[in-house]
Image (cartoon, rainbow, N blue to C red):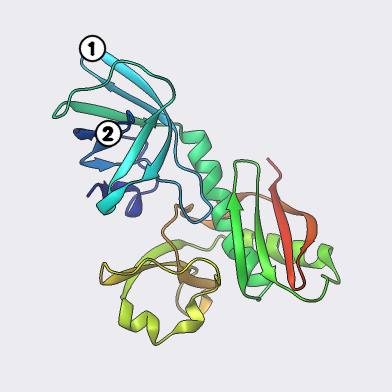
Amino acid sequence: MTKPLFIEDAYQRDAAARVFAVTDEGGIILDETIFYATSGGQPGDSGKLTWDGGEIEIATAVKGEGGAIILVPAEPNAMPAVGAVVTQVLNWERRHRHMRVHTALHLLSVVIPLPVTGGSIGTEKGRLDFDMPDAIEDKAALEDTLNKLIECDFAVSNEWISEEELAAKPELVKTMSVAPPKGAGRIRLVRIGEGENTADLQPCGGTHVRYTSEIGRVRLGKVEKKGKQNRRVYLHLDT
């Protein structure tokens, strides 16, 4: 199992680790990593690994068996030896844009309080699919409300609850298509705001900004009808 350092600190841009294994396909597994693995609509991180006498570009990271995170090289190159100590360096600008979009999508699920049926995150934009039978009446008003929430500069924090506690509070789960990971005994919640000023609280394993003001201004893009009751709402970063 790879220790996911990004769970506790999404701002860690570099870190040392030891090579635990190299897969038959040429993927690299470290004992702990700052690279987020593709899941929940958020792409895997890119960056590079360096070690004494070598360097390799990492195109993405994916989940493997048993909790492993596999770093996928951008191209075939000399690999670090199993047991070698390497330095991980994130493509930070790309990661931070994912964090901004991901946090903004949490707030989008606040201003559109409907069940979420899917989602995707990119560096320029993201989208959520909603169980939304009727069309949005005033997209400009929604966009204005969303930006006002962002400007509130809410703190974004993590906390943990047991699987039993989550089962007793099904209203915390907004996503219909992706269930929170089970089996570890506890579930990570992401809270936007504090106490009575909480804007959002839901299970999530992704990376987020520390304060909503980091998101910057956003705009709502296309709203596409996807099936009988589903509508896809796009969100764009302004800068």
What secondary structure is found at the residue carrying circle 2?
Answer: loop
Could you classify mark 2 by the number of other residues whose Cα lies within 10 Å: few (under 14), some (14-19), or many (20 or more)?
Answer: few
* Residue located farthest toward the right when viewing the structure as drawn: 137
Q: Callout 2, which amino acid? A: Thr
Indicate whether 168 appears above or below 49. Answer: below
Residue 32 x %, y %: 24, 43
Could you classify mark 1 by the number of other residues whose Cα lies within 10 Å: few (under 14), some (14-19), or many (20 or more)?
Answer: few
Indicate whether 155 appears above or below 65. Answer: below
Judge from the rendering whether residue 78 lies leftward or rightward of residue 43; answer left or right.
left
Tell me if I can see residue 140 in this picture: yes
Say whether disc 1 or disc 2 marks the residue closer to the N-terminus.
Answer: 2
Question: Residue 116's quadrant in the figure?
Answer: bottom right
Judge from the rendering whether residue 46 lies leftward or rightward of residue 159; answer left or right.
right
Q: Callout 1, which amino acid? A: Gly
Give the residue at x 27% y 34%.
Answer: 23
* Residue located farthest toward the left when viewing the structure as drawn: 83
* Residue located farthest toward the front when viewing the structure as drawn: 24
The residue where tag 1 is placed is 53
